[in-house]
Image: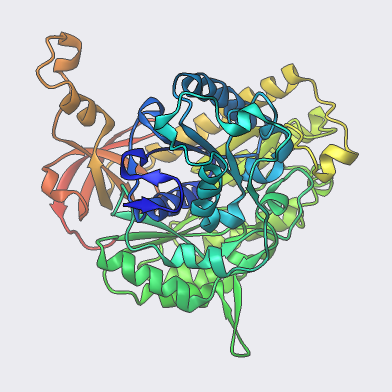
Amino acid sequence: MRYGVGFQMSDRRIYLETMGCQMNVLDSELVRGQLRALGFVSVDDASDADLVVLNTCSVRQHAEDKVYSRLGEIGRLKQQRPGMVVGVIGCMAERDHEGLSGRSMPVDFLCGPGNLHEIPTLIEQVYASRGSNVPNASSRPTALSQDRSRSVPAAQRSLEEDGIESLDLSRSATGGNVLQAYVRVQRGCDKFCTFCVVPWTRGPERSRPPAHILKEVHRLADAGTREITLLGQTVNSYTYDEAGRLVTFAELLARVHEVPGIERIRFVTSYPGDFTDDIFEAMRDLPKVCEYLHLPAQSGSDAVLQRMRRQYTVSQYFDLLDRARAIVPGIALAGDVIVGFSGETEAEHEATLQLIERAAYKNLYIFKYSPRPGTAADRRLPDDVPDEVKRRRHAEVTHLQERISFKHHQQWLGRETEVLVEGPSKAAAKARRTEGSPDPALAWRPRDQLTGRTRTDESVVFRGPDTLIGQLARVKVTASSALTLQGELIEANGPRT
Ligand code: SF4
């Protein structure tokens, strides 16, 4: 059996590595499903693969540096196995076409996030360009690495949604994790925050038809998925014109809530500027919608927010947090901040520390600013905060949040709560892997320890049988740290808190 001009069954081992956000995790799953349908089999090691695909992230310089370093390692593998095909997909493939197509790069094809449905065609083009040679049959360098004057086949981003939409719809079940699944409700972003590459790499904001989203959720529920996370860059700004009537995000939540088999619904990432109270009301009134909200602030200074072109002020942000807490009892909030953005003074940094203290986040994602080529900040604003200052500010924010998270977790002590049991804890998984090891340091590890997640996204570790995996259970919290909670099992399938 052959696919197109190049592939044979013996050539179909794929290694796919994912970097970056939840969108990329979902994209990788869809790409894997697409290639699985063509007979590809996943392997865990790039050195065993015929096709190596890196799904990349452009959101920070550090993420891109990591990709170049990985490509260096993969290039060395490819020298030993010249038949190997290497693809770079995702945001970096869209943003850094020139760098990745360079003469020294081992890359055979590039594909941006808006064209992932074209991957089979791109792979076919790579093999077609090698004439009748099949990859493993030749020890010659690839045609492209011999002749860099030819351009690497790259899918151009298109605003037509048909192909990429059908890729989302082609999904029949999740890959590794059946219990929890991401479902995209929106592509791209129109906000153009000055530091961000997403509007360039993922294109303009487009909401998917509710019927498509529901079809996907039904299929996942039938396959055993219990928890759905709806994904969008600014998920709360979802809106779809359905025969002249606008479907809002709150209404979409209500429709997903009706799908039998789904026990929990989450959504990320929200944009503070577009948040309306009907979403809080949906969180309060729909029992399956979890009381957890990720609401990036980015800075505690109005001047910095303005330079970032965030479309809200600090006081509007706090007003939103106050409304969230007033309308949704027990809601847990998570945030993002960027330290060391262009021109950030000590006073502006101090304002961010104050915001974090007052917001009392459950957890916080902290980033050191790095200019992204092509963004407005890169073109117009100097990267003038020295790196050692950024590092110091990053450490200050981290220490503050650790203290807040620890305090937040302490409030859980003695409480009973519902968890969705995800699987063995990390310690139990390691104990099972090292079963029979003579190392006494491993002997204490409990093999029957499980991890469950609360509705507010806390991780709780407790002892229980594997039969609980995939079920809701009730646990009592007995100990806490800044990162996790420990508990004991009260009962399986407990009622909701
Ligand atoms: S809202 Fe801003 S930070 Fe978020 S994806 Fe859009 S441009 Fe980027």
Where is residue 240 shown, x and y percent of the image? 60, 77
Q: Does any portion of residue 358 appear in the rendered image?
A: no
Whether 448 is drawn above or below 328: the answer is above
Left or right of 69, for residue 432: left
Which of 197/296 is in front?
A: 197
Kindly give the residue lying farthest to the bottom in the view shown.
Answer: 244
**Quarter of the image with the C terminus in it:** bottom left
Where is residue 361 shown, x and y percent of the image? 54, 44
Which of 386/371 is in front?
A: 371
The image quarter in which residue 432 lies: top left
Q: Does any portion of residue 433 appear in the rendered image?
A: yes
Where is residue 257 shown, x and y percent of the image? 38, 73
Whether 442 is drawn above or below 159: the answer is above
Which of 285/227 is in front?
A: 227
All told, the count of numbered labels is: 0
Left or right of 319, for residue 217: left
Which of 312/83 is in front?
A: 83
Kindly give the residue lying farthest to the right in the view shown.
Answer: 380
The image quarter in which residue 237 lies: bottom right
Residue for point 14% across, 16% down: 443
